[in-house]
Image (cartoon, rainbow, N blue to C red):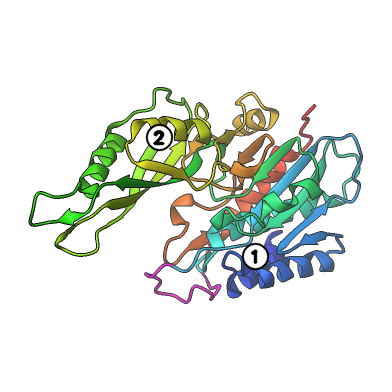
């Protein structure tokens, strides 16, 4: 291997080799901090989050955040390889977190280091390697936004094949409970909560939100968990089910919850409203720069740290979202090298004001 990405690929291999489950990212954070120390880059820390600013920071310039996450999901059950063994075979790097989101993480770091010493940039840069993205945790990026300060643009590194995700669906999880009345199953007693839940689930299955996004499509609802009953001869008085809701830009999570609550007989309790739809206008300078470079854009059905950013953001990175959370996860070395080049081209002399 002989490329500008060599030391970053070695860092990625080191990151793969240490388990970094959400809330257990201490070793991964240590590796990021060790790398920055070796590069003589000052950084700040909070819990398992690490961030740094370009050397020639100038007050008054627009601020761009380069962000990706250091945590991973648990290894999928179908792994045929050691998920923590960073093996390179024929230009393919295998290992848990190689694609989601180790590849984007180290490639954005390479971009940050590339620009770190340059004077007279038209923007300031912040690089942040953050925790708890996979669980949308409160101790990840959200916990350091006040420390980082206001942003003009965030580039969120996730595997998108280096295409531009200019919008991202929001996520809301609803815990629903249908209430009935218990009774003996052999007699005509009680009100079966399962039947009430089935009626509501059928409403969810058939309901269509009126406003459909040109980029993100319709709001999507999926019933993913159901639970009821204690024994065969007792009519259940409660039936609980979980609804996964993916919102577009026309519906805040609060509004979607209100509509669903009015639709159902069951009690509806949202777990959180914090992960709303997010995006960036097509006419934004970085999107227009990407289009001029031949990059395509799309709306992403998956949720990332974009959802908790109250600033204009774009999601783009090396790797393929289809490999995320799968057994024998991998990323191509060529994807990392191409990703570095594309990121740098997107940022070169980018004017945000």
- Residue annotated with mark 1: 9
2 or 1: tag closer to the N-terminus? 1
Which quadrant holds residue 235?
A: bottom left
Residue at the (42%, 66%) spot, across then down: 327
The number of discs equals: 2
Give the overall secondary structure of the magenta segment: loop
In the picture provided, is 142 more to the left or to the right than 126? left
Residues in magenta, as a range: 76-88
Left or right relative to 173: residue 133: right
Magenta segment includes 106: no
Q: Is residue 81 magenta?
A: yes
* Viewer-closest of 326 and 121: 326
- Nearer the observer, 313 or 117: 313
| Viewport quadrant of the N terminus | bottom right
Q: Does residue 302 sit above or below 70 in this rendering?
A: above
Few, some or many C-alpha atoms within 10 Å of disc 2 (few <14, some 14-19, many ≥20)?
A: some
As drawn, the label of residue 261 is 2
């Amino acid at each position: 291997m002989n490329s500008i990405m060599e030391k970053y690929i070695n860092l990625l291999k080191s990151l793969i080799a240490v388990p970094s489950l959400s809330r257990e990212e201490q070793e991964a954070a240590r590796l990021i901090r060790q790398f920055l120390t070796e590069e003589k880059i000052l950084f700040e820390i909070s819990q398992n989050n690490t961030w740094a600013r370009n050397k020639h920071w100038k007050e008054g310039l627009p601020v761009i955040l380069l962000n990706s996450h250091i945590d991973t999901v648990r290894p999928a059950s179908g792994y045929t390889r050691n998920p923590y063994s960073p093996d390179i075979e024929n230009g393919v790097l295998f290992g848990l977190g190689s694609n989601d989101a180790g590849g984007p993480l180290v490639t954005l770091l390479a971009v940050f280091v590339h620009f770190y010493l340059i004077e007279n940039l038209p923007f300031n840069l912040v690089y942040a390697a953050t925790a708890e993205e996979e669980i949308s945790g409160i101790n990840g990026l959200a916990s350091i936004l006040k420390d980082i300060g206001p942003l003009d643009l965030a580039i969120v590194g996730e595997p998108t094949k280096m295409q531009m995700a200019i919008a991202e669906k929001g996520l809301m999880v609803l815990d629903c409970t249908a209430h009935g009345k218990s009774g003996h199953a052999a007699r005509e007693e009680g009100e079966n909560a399962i039947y009430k839940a089935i009626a509501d689930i059928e409403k969810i299955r058939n309901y269509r939100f009126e406003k459909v996004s040109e980029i993100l499509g319709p709001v999507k609802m999926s019933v993913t968990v159901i639970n009821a009953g204690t024994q065969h001869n007792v009519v259940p008085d409660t039936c609980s089910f979980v609804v996964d809701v993916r919102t577009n830009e026309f519906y805040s999570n609060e509004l979607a919850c209100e509509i669903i609550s009015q639709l159902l007989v069951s009690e509806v309790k949202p777990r959180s409203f914090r992960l709303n739809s997010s995006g960036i206008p097509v006419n934004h300078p970085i999107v227009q720069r990407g289009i001029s470079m031949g990059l395509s854009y799309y709306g992403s059905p998956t949720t990332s740290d974009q959802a908790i950013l109250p600033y204009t953001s774009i999601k783009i990175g090396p790797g393929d979202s289809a490999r995320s959370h799968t057994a024998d996860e991998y990323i191509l070395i060529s994807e990392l090298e191409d990703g570095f080049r594309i990121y740098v081209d997107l940022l070169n002399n980018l004017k945000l004001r």
